[in-house]
Amino acid sequence: MTRLVIGLTGNIATGKSTILHYLAEKGASIVDADKLAHRVMEPGGTAYEAVVHSFGREILNEDNTINRKKLGDIVFSDTSALGRLEKLVHPKVFDLGNQEIENAQSPLVILEAIKLLEAGLMVTLCDEVWVVISSFASQLRRLMDNRGMDEAKAQRIIGIQPPQAAKVNQADRVIENNGALDDLYTQLDAIWVDLTRRYPVQMSALQVIGE
């Protein structure tokens, strides 16, 4: 099967999940790099031993699973620790992501990864890169309303992420999402029409599968 692979990225709380839902409803297969990262850091996963060795057994729960909150508290307050974790995890996520794309049932695959561009390897799997952007106020509101973060923590997490402009400069398409669903869906509908024009083989195959 000839597949069209779209890399979807954007900083935290830009609303990527809403876009993924739209594309899944259209019949796309979704590969979520964050979920892949969970899998490679599970006991027996390909990154588990290296992460535990690097960050210490104090990040473990009683059942020897990695306590993601403890690990998150470490890496989100120390950029060097975050970089160390990413060097351990990203190559393993790449290998698993490549495998998931090969096994996808749809000719359209969406690879969602917050560090798609920064990780380097993952972007090589993509035919197009879509970047979702939002205002600081929109990101802050989503983190506080949807994830229950206090304002100080939300601001800190937004602040340590790479500038959105750096992602935009590498994007094939930029989607602006500041909370108005009608505006977002108008953009996505237009992109869908253009995909049908640019990639007729894959998009025609997608339509056949959906019938």
Image (cartoon, rainbow, N blue to C red):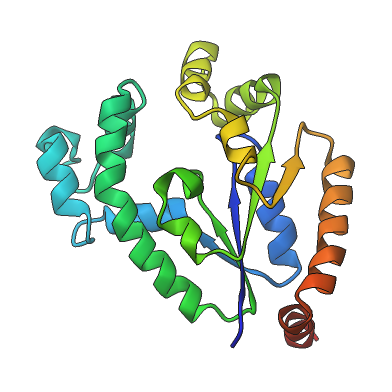
Using residue 161 as the reference point, say whether residue 58 is left or right of it.
left
Q: Nearer the viewer, residue 99 or 124?
A: 124
Q: Is residue 37 visible?
A: yes
* Direction top: furthest residue: 152
In the image, residue 14 lies at what x, y percent? 65, 36
Residue at position x 27%, y 52% in the image: 41
In the image, residue 72 lies at what x, y percent? 34, 32
Q: Is residue 63 visible?
A: no
In the figure, residue 87 lies in which quadrant? top left
- Position of the C terminus by quadrant: bottom right
Residue at position x 55%, y 13% in the image: 151
* Direction front: furthest residue: 169
Note whether 36 is above or below 82 in the view shown. Answer: below
In the figure, residue 182 lies in which quadrant? top right
In the image, residue 9 lies at what x, y percent? 58, 47
In the image, residue 162 lies at what x, y percent? 50, 30
Note whether 133 is above or below 90 in the view shown. Answer: above
Q: Nearer the viewer, residue 62 or 71?
A: 71
